[in-house]
Image (cartoon, grey):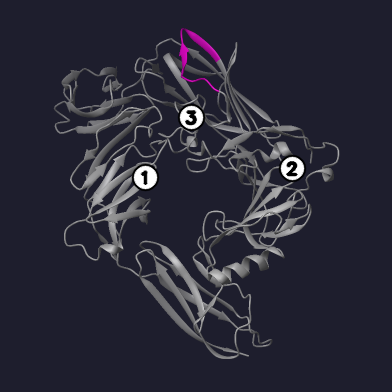
Amino acid sequence: MKFVPILIGCFFLSVSSAHTEEFFVPPLKGDLFATSSFGEYRDGRFHMGVDYRAGIGTPVYAVDDGYVTRMRCAPWGYGRGLYIQFRSGIIGIYAHLHSFAEPYQSYLRRIQHQKQSFSVDLTIKENELPVKKGDLIAYAGQSGTNAPHLHFELRTKDGITCLNPWELGFRWIDRNKPQVSSILVIPGNTNTTINGCCLPLEIPVNEKTTYPILIHAQGALGFGISTIDPESGSCKLGPYRISLKTAEATLTTIQQDRIDYNTYRDAVVAFYPYISNPIYWTLWQWQGNQSPNYKQARKGCLPIDSEEHIQIEVEDFNKNKIQVPIYITDRVKNIPSKKTEKSEVFVHYLPDFIVIEIILSSTASKELPIINITSEQGTSSLNPIQRATNVYELPWEPPSSGKYTFHVLHPTLPNWEKTIYALKANDKLNPIALDGFYINIPSNAPYGILWLSISPLSHQKIPKELTLASKIWKIEPYNMPMAEPVPIKLQILDNIQPKERIHLYRKTGSSWSRMDSSQNGNFVTGSISDWGIFALIRDDAPPQITNITINKDTKQPTKRPSLSASISDIGSGIAKAEIFCNQKWLLAEYDGPRGILRWEQDEDLPSGNQTITFVVTDYAGLTKKECRTLSVP
């Protein structure tokens, strides 16, 4: 493990490269393997630390002298987390722990019993819980997450900036080169064509790819790349550095040295939002993206005059590299017709404009399609561009923020109509009020242009144990990047009681998830961070308690038997889960990802026959209880 000098924020950290024991020690013993690297994609955000492979119960150590500043326990998120202020000025976070070592475990449990709550977030006074370098401080686990590992995160003293652990010497086995699976090319304006279309182009990259990759393009281009660093068996880590270069200059460098919580949301435009699979890094600086890992970034797209040679280089944390050369020519490329049994219309959303694509069926008349656009300024008719025999496109940029209704005129598309709202950054859009649906978008919400199209849905299933309390609304495009959350308000349908059990829900896959919301009369308000499908739902189903297990060792009777149960809730989700012995509260962990309520076995139970009660309450206030009798020696 090698340590190097590095400038962090406004102070300089000088670390010995000759003897690691002179400064930091590793958080785990033995060879370190990463399962996730610093700065990786995480569902519209960056991964703020490194995840080291570690089984449940693996000892975890303090990397430096310092003191504990914070301890957290929760069913989700970081689970059990330990925050340490080190003498170097860095804050270290150890997360997803199975348990804490002494004296930290006893300190935590004392306060958990005082509060009668497993979930706590404790701020610790300076030097109340001192730590020495190399001390055993905890044991790795899987609290709050799906698989065992140690999440190790380093922050500056203000807690805002996360630092690349590799550059501070906290490294991992990294033998392989990065891999590139796909290149993304997007049009930068409405006059651009890429291989004959004004649409994004995805180019698969594999062992059969011929280099340089040939692209026929005119106009301005934006590039993206889908890349991983395959390590530790099946683990797919992220890159350290991505560079976009021409023969004359480096246009963009994304480098994972630091990430700020102040610009945390900007990850939604660091990864191209309008394609969810695969994930593409955007190799230009999207409007509003202030994330510090964009070291050097072109503000807009690359203009192409006649031809251009570019190269995308990907480097992992151990300086293993791979290059992808690309040759761009302005020679026109014709595209073939597209086969379809019926005529179709598609709306493609891009950062600064949309493209309405019309594909006519092979039996359609020779009549050319026309698109009418209606706004506050009136109605205008536009002729889409013919790209192939039966393929037409209308690239369109809104002249201002507002409401625009598009109507395609063609005999095979008699009823196609779509209303799209566009809001430019720092501009204003009038509040939108539909039938029981209200939305008012802040002017600072867009990155560039914020698009939305709203429509009611009639054919969406909800579980029979729940009651639909409003119309169901779909807002698209999904994965729309937003710089700030957007408030929405839905009206409760008449005669739906009791209103206290009604919340705002979002459809996630095939299920519905409750969102934080507030109720005011007949309306429920919540804030959303991207578009999707939303509705008000009344929770009529109490939580479920199953698989109650009380293990007593008949050979060695114990006053601390294991007590556990599986708990779940189909509706609003579990708000509180507890275990009681008679009426005495027991410290029990709610393991959210596995849906298990488990006693911590941290004290003796009283002798004799005892009533063990499992109590689970959901966010609608519905409670389920299950009791068992236990004989304690």
Label 1: how many Cα within 10 Å (few below 14, some 14–19, many 20+) = some
Q: Which residue is drawn at 78% across and 45% down?
A: 24
Q: Earlier in the sequence, mark 2 or mark 1?
A: 2
**Local SS, label 2:** loop
Q: Residue furthest top?
A: 306
Say which residue label 1 marks: 528
Question: Does the magenta segment cover residue 626?
Answer: no
Q: In this view, does 310 lie to the left or right of 201?
A: right
Q: Which of marks 2 and 3 is nearer the N terminus?
A: 2
* Residue sitting nearer the eye, 468 or 441: 441
- For mark 2, what is the residue? 88
What kind of element bears circle 3?
Answer: loop
In the visual, does 607 lie left or right of 169? left
In the rendering, at what x and y percent does residue 393 appear? Answer: 29, 22
Which numbered circle lies on residue 289?
A: 3
Residue 548: x, y in percent?
50, 77
Q: Looking at numbered disc 3 in the image, what kind of residue is underneath it? A: Asn
Segment tinted magenta in the rendering: 297-309
